[in-house]
Image (spheres, rainbow, N blue to C red):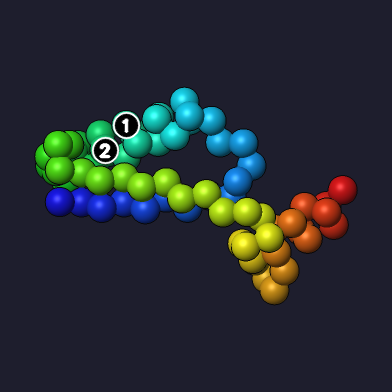
Amino acid sequence: MPYVNIKVTQEGVTAEQKRALIEGVTELLQRVLGKDPATTVVVIEEFPTDNWGIGGESITERRRAAR
């Protein structure tokens, strides 16, 4: 049973985009690895930009500095 965890920042990912990710990842695992879609689990986690850091600073700080 494949388990895929997709982590993104909370920046307006729509329900339609999430549905497309779930369908796409499930199809990819079936096509490439022959995995059964009925047992494939896909979880999407969204995090506030304050809780995601790159290079020693939060995404919130990076976005603010880029303006």
Badge 1 density bin: few <14, some 14–19, many ≥20, Cα 10 Å: few
For the point 14% across and 37% down, the residue is 38
Q: Amino acid at mark 2?
A: Thr
Q: Position of residue 31 (x, y in %)?
A: 19, 36
Q: Is residue 61 left or right of residue 36?
A: right
Question: Given contact means CB atoms under 8 Å apart, are the residues at marks 2 and 1 in contact?
Answer: yes
Q: Helix, strand, or loop for circle 1? A: helix
**Viewer-side residue, 32 vs 60:** 60
Left or right of 36? Residue 24 is right
Q: Which mark is residue 23?
A: 1
Q: Give the residue drawn at x 72%, y 69%.
A: 57
Residue 8 place in picture, x, y as percent: 53, 49
Q: Residue furthest top?
A: 16
Where is 61 relative to 4, above or below?
below
Q: Is residue 23 left or right of residue 55?
A: left
- Give me the C-alpha separation between circle 2 and circle 1: 5 Å
Residue extending farthest to the bottom is: 56
| Image label count | 2
Residue drawn at the location 37% of the way across and 53% of the way down: 5
Q: Which residue is mark 2?
A: 26
Apparent side of residue 47 relative to residue 25 in the rendered image (left or right) = right
